[in-house]
Amino acid sequence: MAMSWIWVIMVGLSLLFGWQNGTIAEVSAAAGTGAQSAVELCVSMAGPLCLWTGVMAVLRESGGLEKLSGLLRPVLGRLYPAFHGDDTVMESISANVSANLLGLGNAATPLGIQAARGMAERSPGVASDALCMLVVCNTASIQLIPTTIAAVRSGAGSQTPFDILPAVWLASACSVTAGILAARLFARLWRRI
C-alpha cells in the first residue's frame, strides 16, 4: 500500500512541476518513452532468464544440483550448525546457494523461503540466529555467473555482458563476508543483552 502512495506522489509531483515549468509535453513524452524502454528491456531479458532457469532445471533433474549442494554442505554446515543434521533444511539451503551462485535470484527465492520455513519450525515467532544468517547470505549472495545482470546488460546493448565478472566476484565476496561477520557479531551481542 505504501508503494502505491509513493508512486502516486511521484507522478503527481512530476505533473505539477511539468505544468509549473511549462514542460508538461516533455513529461508526457518521457513517460511514454520510459514505458516503451521498460517493455523492450523485459522482452530482451526473457530469453537469457529462460535459458538459465532451464539450465537450473536440467541441473536439478540430472542430479547436478545435488552434487553441487553436496560440495557446499561442509561449508553450510559450519554456517548453520543447528541444522547440520536436518537434511530437508540443509538441502533447501544448498539449493538456494546453488541458484544464487548461478545468478538466478528468481529461482533462489522459493528455495530460500522453503529453508526459512523449515528453520522457523524450531523457533516459531522468533528469528533465530540461523534464520538471520540465511537472510543475510541470501541477500548478499555470492554469484559466480551473474545471469540476471548479464541479461540486463545484453538487453541494453552490451556486446560483452559478462565482462563484469571480476567486479561481481569481488563485490559479492566482500558483501557476503561483511554480512556473515555482521550477523555473527550481532548474534553474540544480542545474547549478552
Image (spheres, rainbow, N blue to C red):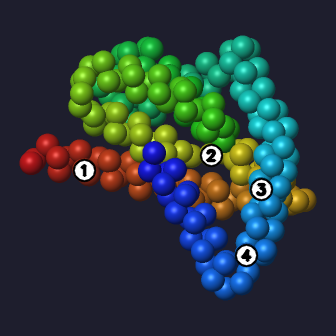
Taking the spot 26% from the left edge, 19% from the top edge, the residue there is 122
User: Disc 3 vs disc 2: which is toward the camera?
Assistant: 3
Secondary structure of the residue carrying tag 4 is helix
Distance of mark 3 from mark 2, alpha carbons? Answer: 30 Å
Name the quadrant of the N terminus: top left
Asked if residue 140 is positioned above or below residue 133 in the image, the reply reads below
User: Disc 4 vs disc 3: which is toward the camera?
Assistant: 4
Is 43 left, or right, of 118 in this rendering? right
The one of 168 and 46 positioned closer to us in this rendering: 46
Residue type, numbered disc 2: Gln
The one of 76 and 145 positioned closer to us in this rendering: 145
Residue type, numbered disc 3: Ala
Asked if residue 6 is positioned above or below residue 18 in the image, the reply reads above
Marked residue nearer the N-terminal end (1 or 4): 4
Distance of mark 1 from mark 4, alpha carbons? Answer: 50 Å
> Dot 3: few (<14), some (14–19), or many (≥20) neighbours within 10 Å?
few
User: Disc 1 vs disc 4: which is toward the camera?
Assistant: 4
Residue type, numbered disc 1: Phe
Asked if residue 81 is positioned above or below residue 4 in the image, the reply reads above
Is 53 left, or right, of 43 in this rendering? left
Mark linked to residue 24: 4
User: Disc 4 vs disc 2: which is toward the camera?
Assistant: 4
Work out whether residue 5 can be spotted: yes
Residue type, numbered disc 4: Ile
Kindly identify which residue carries mark 3. 35
Marked residue nearer the N-terminal end (1 or 3): 3
Is 125 left, or right, of 68 in this rendering? left
Kindly identify which residue carries mark 1. 186
